[in-house]
Image: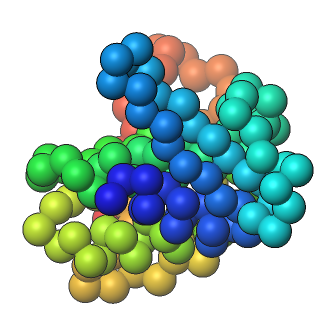
């Protein structure tokens, strides 16, 4: 099941992948094919992927494993900072759809990136922090609060 979900998420970006568990050696290898129509783009060394490809692959793995975990909260912090705009859009849409389907769990996504493409609703809330004041202030740092 985790293997299938991992591949399905990578397919959203035109890639494919599988997870190779070696229970005797206690290892997990990620095999990623950057272009799901070109077997020559298959790569067993995730370190050889670009930063954005590696981030999207990691996100796919976390989501796939997360479907098997029975945790009431899922928190992802700055998961999208190394993603290119296309991958980021796919990742955000995928995460929001998964979160909506699992309404018995609470998802918290923390990002410094723009969220204008996400439509708030009954199941989706967006909280933005006020940008920090830049410059020299007497008395040092000040506390940030959420806008209501």
Query: Quick one: quadrant of the N terminus?
Result: bottom left
Residue at 82% x, 56% y: name it.
39
Which quadrant of the structure image shows residue 82? Answer: top right
Residue at 25% x, 85% y: name it.
122
Task: Determine whether, in the image, residue 141 is placed left or right of residue 23.
Answer: right
Q: Position of residue 49 (x, y in %)?
A: 78, 37
Is residue 52 shown to the viewer in this render? no
Q: How many marks?
A: 0
Task: Determine whether, in the image, residue 123 is placed left or right of residue 95.
Answer: left
Q: Position of residue 68 (x, y in %)?
A: 23, 52
Give the colour scheme of this rendering. Answer: rainbow
Q: Out of 143 and 90, give the one closest to the viewer.
A: 90
Is residue 38 shown to the viewer in this render? yes
Query: Quick one: quadrant of the C terminus?
Result: bottom left
Single out the residue that lies furthest toward the front.
Answer: 24
Q: Position of residue 100 (x, y in %)?
A: 29, 77
Is the residue 131 above or below the residue 28 in the image? below
Task: Determine whether, in the image, residue 133 is placed left or right of residue 4.
Answer: right
Is the residue 25 above or below the residue 7 in the image? above
Residue at 33% x, 24% y: name it.
23
């Amino acid at each position: 099941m985790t293997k299938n979900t991992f591949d399905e998420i990578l397919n959203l970006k035109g890639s494919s992948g599988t997870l190779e568990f070696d229970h005797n050696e206690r290892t997990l290898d990620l095999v990623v094919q950057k272009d799901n129509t070109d077997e020559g783009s298959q790569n067993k060394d995730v370190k050889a992927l670009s930063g954005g490809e590696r981030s999207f692959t990691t996100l796919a793995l976390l989501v796939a494993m997360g479907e098997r975990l029975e945790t009431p909260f899922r928190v992802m912090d700055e998961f999208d900072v190394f993603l290119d705009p296309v991958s980021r859009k796919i990742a955000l849409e995928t995460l929001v759809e998964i979160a909506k389907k699992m309404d018995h769990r609470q998802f918290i996504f923390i990002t410094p990136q723009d969220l204008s493409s996400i439509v708030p609703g009954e199941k989706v809330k967006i909280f933005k922090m006020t940008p920090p004041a830049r410059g020299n202030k007497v008395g040092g740092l000040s506390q940030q609060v959420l806008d209501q």
